[in-house]
Image: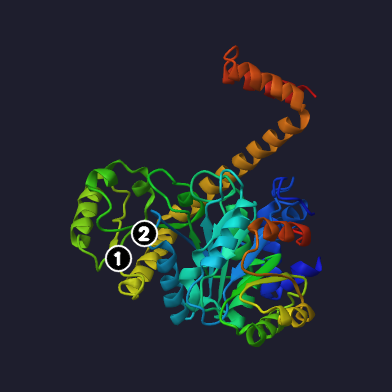
Amino acid sequence: MSDLIERFLAGERRALSRILTRVENGTPEGREYLRQLYPRSGRAHTIGITGGAGSGKSSLTGSLAAELRRRGHEVGVIAVDPSSPFTQGAILGDRIRMQDLVLDPGVFVRSMASRGALGGLAPTIDDVVAVMDAFGFPYVFIETVGAGQDEVEIAGTALTTVLVNNPGTGDDIQALKAGIIEIADVLVVNKADRPGADVLVSQLRALLSLAPSEGRDIPILSTVATTGDGVPELVDAIDEHRAWLDSSGELERHRRQEARHQVLSVAQRILLEQIRRETSEETLGDLVGQVAGRSLDPHTAAEQLVEQGQAV
Amino acid sequence: MTASPETPAQGETGQKIRVLIAKPGLDGHDRGAKIVARALRDGGCEVIYTGIRQTPQMIAEAALQEDVDVVGLSILSGAHLELFPRIVEELRSRGLDDVVLFCGGIIPEEDTEALEAMGFSAIFRPGTNTRDIVSFVYDNASSE
């Protein structure tokens, strides 16, 4: 067993940090660490915090972590911010809202860039979550990039998805058409000290009454993340959702579905990498040129690419 | 792996240079730090920015949790000879002795030697072209 794994298992945070980097980067070394640590994961309650840019996800995550610390639990946080589509660089600023937690040895905050992934998370997010889980944090928060209407990947990655809304950010039609509301296990109206909070709560309640019930009522909670108002109640609601997952058999279903999704998406990536490896730049450039010139359609070009990749 | 700003910072296996930009002490404004953070982002780095009024322990702890390759400190208050040695000490006590250090802000010429002795590889003063900072990071950081 490598030295780093030994130190990880002994609870050394520096070892956790270094393993996270390698796993995030998907290096062969990182995959080996994941292979060894994966059987130790699956114990944490993983909680997704999603919502629009500026809705207060980071502040709320910080307040939730602080409340769980008061209750005696250790907390891991993974905060995702967007990468630039042009330079692939990123500014990761979620820690700014979690200052009070920095020196707490029971909290570990890791920032991740989205690195081109669609859906509000990062390409290797599930692997990074598994490592945090394997380290032994009973609660692991995953904060998505600012999500709008369709960033729903978090519902697979996390056991409990919390959707953060704010008063004054659009009428109820916005909420009605948004796919993201369908993935929420717990709804939050944050910045509830602002005008319009009560109206939003009743709009959300009306909206939920239209949706088919899945044997569980989705709670709507009001919070003010910056003061901590409503945060203990939100922690209770998150715990209640976990208890429901356990008692209803949903937990098993969620785990199987997520495992299936992960296996298929990694297989997809492996195949794509294989095709890229087996295809010369010249062949690819030729196909791209034909598609750009409209003499070939993208589907036919892709089929040719796949056939060539497999022929080798 | 070293790469120049012209080549993508994302290597074959997805390694990225990670940089912590931090403001120790009581400075109230952080325009310079934000400009540097933005320039490094545009250079393809992943930049963790922690905001103002960071203690040496907070900076070192953030560097540990984020597993950064480089730490850049911005200071305007004149307290660098007070604060920087404590930051270096906090980094070392956490085993982060391979992190590349640079600093910038209002730092008199006569302090250069002392800062170099502490382990700072570069000092960027007002008027620096941000491209020089990006080049410095790429030349000195080995992301893994």
Amino acid type indicated by mark 1: Lys
Name above or below for residue B86 compared with residue A145.
below
Q: Is residue A171 left or right of residue A187?
A: left
Q: Which mark is residue A55?
A: 2
| Element type where label 2 sits in the image | loop
Name above or below for residue A284 compared with residue B18.
above
Colour mapping used in the image? rainbow
| Element type where label 1 sits in the image | loop
Marks 1 & 2, CB-CB < 8 Å contact? yes
| Residue A11, quarter of the rendered image | bottom right
Task: Kindly identify which residue carries mark 1.
Answer: A191
Residue B115 x, y percent position in the rendering: 74, 79
Mark with earlier residue (1, 2): 2
Residue A9 vs residue A121, the one in the foreground: A121
Residue A166 x, y percent position in the rendering: 30, 58
Q: Which mark is residue A206?
A: none
Q: What's the residue at 59%, 15% (across, down)?
A: A293
Residue A290 x, y percent position in the rendering: 63, 16
| Residue B123, quarter of the rendered image | bottom right
Name above or below for residue A97 compared with residue A124.
below
Can I make out residue B67 in this image?
A: yes
Q: Is residue A159 left or right of residue B87?
A: left
| Residue A220, quarter of the rendered image | bottom left
Residue B27 vs residue A91, the one in the foreground: B27
Residue A172 vs residue A312, the one in the foreground: A172
Amino acid type indicated by mark 2: Ser
Q: Badge 1 sits on which subunit? A: A
Name above or below for residue A288 compared with residue A221.
above
For label 1, the crowd category at 10 Å Cα-Cα, with few meaning under 14, some 14 to 19 and many 20 or more, is many
Quarter of the figure with the C terminus of chain A: top right
Residue at the top extreme of this rendering? A295
Looking at the picture, do discs 1 and 2 lie on one chain?
yes
